[in-house]
Amino acid sequence: MSHLPIISQQELDRQSEIMSRVAALNEHKHPLAFVDTYGCQQNEADSEKLRGMLSRMGYRFTDDEHSADIIVINTCAVREHAEHRILGNVGALTHTKRAKPGQKIVLCGCMVQQKHMAERIKRSFPIVDLVFGPHEMYRFPELIEQMIQPHKGRIFAVRDTQGEYVEGLPSLRQGRVKAWLTVMYGCNNFCSYCVVPLVRGRERSRTPDKVLEEARRLVDEGYKDITLLGQNVNSYGRDLDSDWDFSRLIESINSIPGDFVIRFMTSHPKDASERLFKTIADCEKAAKHIHLPFQSGSSRVLSAMNRHYTRESYLALVELAREIMPQISLTSDVIVGFPSETEEDFEETLSLVERVRFDMLFTFIYSPRAGTPAEKMPDPVSREEKQLRFDRLLEIHNAISAENQASHIGKTERVLIDGVSSAAAGNLTGRTSENRLVYLSGPRELVGSFKNVKITDSNTWSLTGSII
Ligand code: SAH
Ligand code: SF4
C-alpha cells in the first residue's frame, strides 16, 4: 500500500515563515493563550503541537480563560457526553469574551470535523472565530494569521479528506517525565459504533526513522516514560512499503541506551499476536501492561460491532499473554448497551470481566454517533435499563479491582516517580511497570527517578507505598 500524500517541506516552510511573521506582530504584546483539551491521548499530543506552534508565534500560556487573548479548544467526538460538555463550555465563554473584547475563540479537533457540528457552531455559536479539523493542523499558523487580522470574518476550515502525513511540527510538551509519541494516525477498522475513522482518516504510519529519531531525542531530553500512540498500534507499518511492524519498532526503541519505560496504546485484539507478547516480555524497557479493549463479552455483539474477533478468541489471547508474562497487567474498554444488546449478551460481558479480572476497566454506555452503521441499528433497550447494566458492571469490576490492588500489599515494586499530588496518601505519584498508580511521600526532587517502593496499602484504584 502506498502512503497518503505527505505535506511538502515547502508548505511547512511557508507555515514556519508565517509563524515568524505572527511572532513579529506579537512582539512586546506578549499575548496569552489558553489551550483546553478533551478526549484521548492523541488529542493531548496534538495539543502539544498546537502549543508548540503558538509558542513560536509569540504566545505565552495561561490556565485562566478570562485573561486569555486566544482560547483554543481541542475537541473530542467519541461520545455525545463529551460533545455536550464542550458545547456547554463554549456557550459559557460568551460572558468571558464580553468581558475581554478582542478575545479570540478557536475550536479544533474531531468534534468539528463532523459536518453537522461545524454547521451548528456556525449557526449557534457566533462567538467562535475559527474552526478547523484535525487534517488542517499543520495550517494552524496560517489560520491564526488570518484570524488576527482586523475586520476578518469567521473562518471555517474543515476539509473532507483521507488525511495526509505531516512531519516536523514543533511541539511544546506538557510534562518533563512522560511523553506521548505518535507512531500512526487515523484508523482503518470501522468498528460499527465508532466515529474515529470518519474524523481522523485512514491509517498513516510514521516512518521508523522519524519515530526512532523522536524517541532518541526524548531520551536525551530526560523523558523516562514514553507512550507510543496509535488507534491500533498493532497495524503499525502495514501502510509502509517495508518489513517494519510494531514489534520491531518496540525492539528498536528498547535498544536506545538509557533508563526509561516504553508504553503503548491501543492494541486491537484482532491484531495482537504472540510475537507482540514475546517482544514485550523480552524488551526490558517495555512496560508489562497491555490495554486490550474487548468492548463486549458476546460474540454476537462483537460481530455486530465489526470487531473481527470472538469472545473465545479474546479469552484465548488473554491466556496466551498471561502464559508468556504471568505478571502482565491487563486493562480494557467496554461498551454497555450497544444496539440490541440483550440481557444474555450483557451477562456474557459480566462473565468475561469476572474471568479476566482486568486491572482497570474503562466503561462506557453506548453513544450513537452520526454516520456510523450502529446509529441505524434498532435499539429497543431503554436508557434506564442501560444505566442499570452499567452500574452492575461497575460494581463487579470495582470489587475485582480492589482485590487486585490489595494483592500487591507487601510487595516491592520498581516505581517511576512521575508527579506531585495533594492526596492524603502521599505528596508524590508514581507508576509501577504495570502502570499501577502509587502514592508515596518524599522530596519533590525525586520526580523523574525510579525507586524501589514497598507497597503498604491499597484501595480500588491505587496503591500506597514507601520508598525503601
Ligand atoms: N482505537 C481504540 C479506542 C478509541 S475510542 C480501540 O479501538 O480500542 C476509546 C474507547 O471509546 C473505545 O475503546 C470504546 O470503548 C469507546 N467508544 C468508542 N465509540 C463509542 C461510542 N459510540 N459509544 C460509547 N463508547 C464508545
Ligand atoms: Fe474506533 Fe475501532 Fe478504530 Fe478503535 S479500532 S478507533 S474503536 S474504529
Image: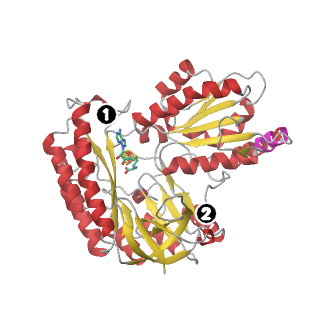
Q: Secondary structure at mark 2?
A: helix
Residue 301, relative to residue 448: is it above or below? above
- Give the amino acid at mark 2: Glu
Tell me if residue 24 is in the magenta stretch: yes
Q: Check mark 2 vs ligand 1: CB closer than 8 Å? yes or no.
A: no
Q: Earlier in the sequence, mark 2 or mark 1?
A: 2
Q: Is residue 44 left or right of residue 326?
A: right
Q: Residue at x 15, y 41 (%)?
A: 343
Residue at image mark 1:
373
Q: Residues within 10 Å of mark 1 (few under 14, many from 20)?
A: some
User: Of residues 270 and 450, which is closer to you in this image?
Assistant: 450
- Give the amino acid at mark 1: Pro
Residue pushed farthest left? 344
Residue 106, relative to residue 440: is it above or below? above
Q: Secondary structure at mark 1?
A: helix
Q: Main secondary structure of the magenta part?
A: helix
Q: Quadrant of residue 454?
A: bottom left
Task: Give me the disc on residue 238.
Answer: none
Tell me if residue 338 can be seen.
no
Q: Residue at x 47, y 38 (%)?
A: 199
Q: Quadrant of residue 122?
A: top right
Q: Is residue 383 left or right of residue 168?
A: left
User: Of residues 307 and 101, which is closer to you in this image?
Assistant: 101
User: Bounds of the magenta span?
Assistant: 18-25
Residue at image mark 2:
214
